[in-house]
Amino acid sequence: MTKPLRWTLALLAAAIALPAGAYLWAKAEYYPAEAVDRAQAFINLLHAGQFDHAQDLALRNEYVGRTPEEFSELMFRQLCDVDHVAWTAPPQTNGNRLRRWFNGAQVEMPEITVEFEGGCLVSVHLRRTADGQWKVFNMQRHAG
């Protein structure tokens, strides 16, 4: 095979592979790792009985409790054994995030739900604070 033909085939392959790869990347679902990590840390602290540290990861409201006593009581009732993340919501693709960035819109969603499965189903709802941190504003055990 001649050198010009090799270059032509390489350019043709790149011309096909790069747009196809970009399309697949844009359509792939974005995984909000930071929010999931915060929700998992929250659950782990509750399981370890470290309610005071868990409350540091939460907003103080009527859903999780305003005082340490309310927090401990409410979270103890909602806690169960979970072993993996089932899904997050709302779903967002890499392309959607890129479009929002290009348009100057907020890229991160203001609220995310992380659903855990295991011995029961638990939803951890997080909100992004003004300083960019994810804080738990509700946690609920529920039926499937």
Image (spheres, rainbow, N blue to C red):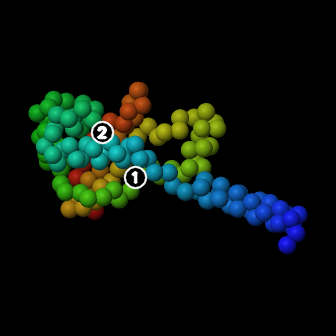
22 horizontally vs 50: left or right? right
Q: Residue at x 41, y 27 (%)?
A: 130
Q: Is residue 100 left or right of residue 108?
A: right
The residue nearer to you, when weighing 74 against 31, is: 31
Q: Position of residue 30 (x, y in %)?
A: 50, 51
Q: Is residue 64 above or below residue 119?
A: above
104 relative to 1, above or below: above
| Residue 125 visible, this orientation | no
In the picture, which quadrant includes the N terminus?
bottom right
Q: Secondary structure at mark 1?
A: strand
Q: Residue shown at 83%/62% (left/top)?
A: 7
Callout 2: few (<14), some (14-19), or many (20+) C-alpha neighbours within 10 Å?
Answer: many
In the picture, the disc for residue 88 is: 1
Residue 136: mark in rendering? 2
Q: Give percent across and percent down for residue 77.
A: 14, 48
Q: Are marks 2 and 1 in contact (CB under 8 Å)?
A: no
Q: Position of residue 132 (x, y in %)?
A: 42, 31
Residue 25 in view, yes or no: yes
The x, y position of residue 14, in whole percent, is 74, 60
Residue at 13 percent of width and 43 percent of height: 49
Q: Nearer the viewer, residue 17 or 29?
A: 17
Identify the residue at image location x=76%, y=64%: 13
Mark 2 vs mark 1: which is more N-terminal? 1
Q: Is residue 24 above or below residue 128?
A: below
Nearest the viewer among 130 and 84 is 84
**Front-lying residue, 143 or 47:** 47
Mark 2 residue type: Val
Q: Classify residue 86 by image quadrant.
A: bottom left
**Marks 2 and 1, Cα distance to the nearest angstrom?**
14 Å
Query: The C terminus lies in which quarter of the figure?
Result: bottom left
